[in-house]
Image: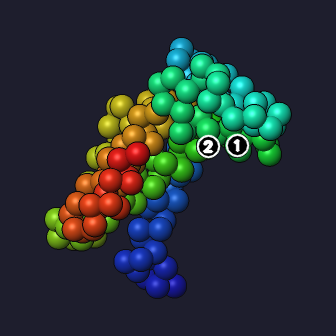
Amino acid sequence: MLKKLLNNKNITIIFFLIWFLIFISLSFLRDSISDENIYLGNSIEIANILKGGEWIGNYGIGLHGFLNKLVLGIIYIFTGPSVFIATLINIVFSILSGILFYKILLKHFKFSQIYSLLGVMLLFCSYQFLMYTPTFFRDIPALFFILLIVDSILDKKSKWTTGLFLL
């Protein structure tokens, strides 16, 4: 039974599920700090402006990038403001970054499954990654899109696709 459970595909799924649980656990040991409070406030304001049927273009809340704030603002329309929701978005981006990095190591660098998982573990255990995952800073989503661009270039996808990832 255990041997059947621990086949190659299941090990990868279990690996990322364990890291998801670790990141969720870390999110309970934090509070919003410094610039993160500004980003969360901007997201709340975006939600309120969009609820009022206006577009955010006339307001000064798009500074320092607005796409991540816009996504969170749209989610806040349905859920209401929550630090946990903002953190959960970053955790999802962290796991997706790990999955994409795993794919790059496995497919393009031809690493074995165990070495690819060890590479992802090195990424996940880095100080900056552990510090920024349970926050609403833009670093983790930025890393995800950089990995998406690298994967697009290595896959030799069209320049248009790669250009869209640069947005």
Q: Nearer the viewer, residue 48 or 86?
A: 48
Numbered tag placed on residue 36 in the rendering: none
Numbered circles on residues, count: 2
Q: Which amino acid lies under the numbered mark 1 shown in the image of this protein?
A: Ile
Quick check: 109 left or right of 94? Answer: left
Mark 1 surroundings within 10 Å by alpha-carbon count, few (fewer than 14), some (14 through 19), many (20 or more): some
Q: Which x, y percent locates residue 145?
A: 38, 48
Tell me, yes or no, if residue 115 can be seen here.
Answer: no
Residue at 49 percent of width and 48 percent of height: 93
Res 150 seen here: yes
Q: CA distance from mark 2 to mark 1?
A: 5 Å
Q: Residue at x 66, y 31 (%)?
A: 56
Q: Are marks 2 and 1 in contact (CB under 8 Å)?
A: yes
Quadrant for the C terminus in the image: top left
- Image side of residue 115 versus residue 143, left or right: left
From the top left corner, tell me how far across and down residue 17 is, in percent. Answer: 52, 59
17 on left or right of 165:
right
In the rendered image, residue 101, in percent from the top left (x then y), is placed at 32, 57
Q: In this figure, which residue is indicated by the disc labeled 2?
A: 71
Q: Residue 74: give its label.
A: 1
Q: In terms of image quadrants, where is residue 85? A: top right
- Which element is circle 2 on? helix
Q: Position of residue 87 (x, y in %)?
A: 60, 37
126 or 104, which lies in front? Answer: 104
Say which amino acid is labelled 2: Val
**Quadrant location of residue 73?**
top right
1 above or below 104? Answer: below
Residue neighbourhood size for the residue with mark 2, other residues' Cα within 10 Å, grouped as few (<14), some (14–19), many (≥20)? some
Tell me what residue is drawn at x 59 percent, y 34 percent.
69
Q: How is the image coloured?
A: rainbow
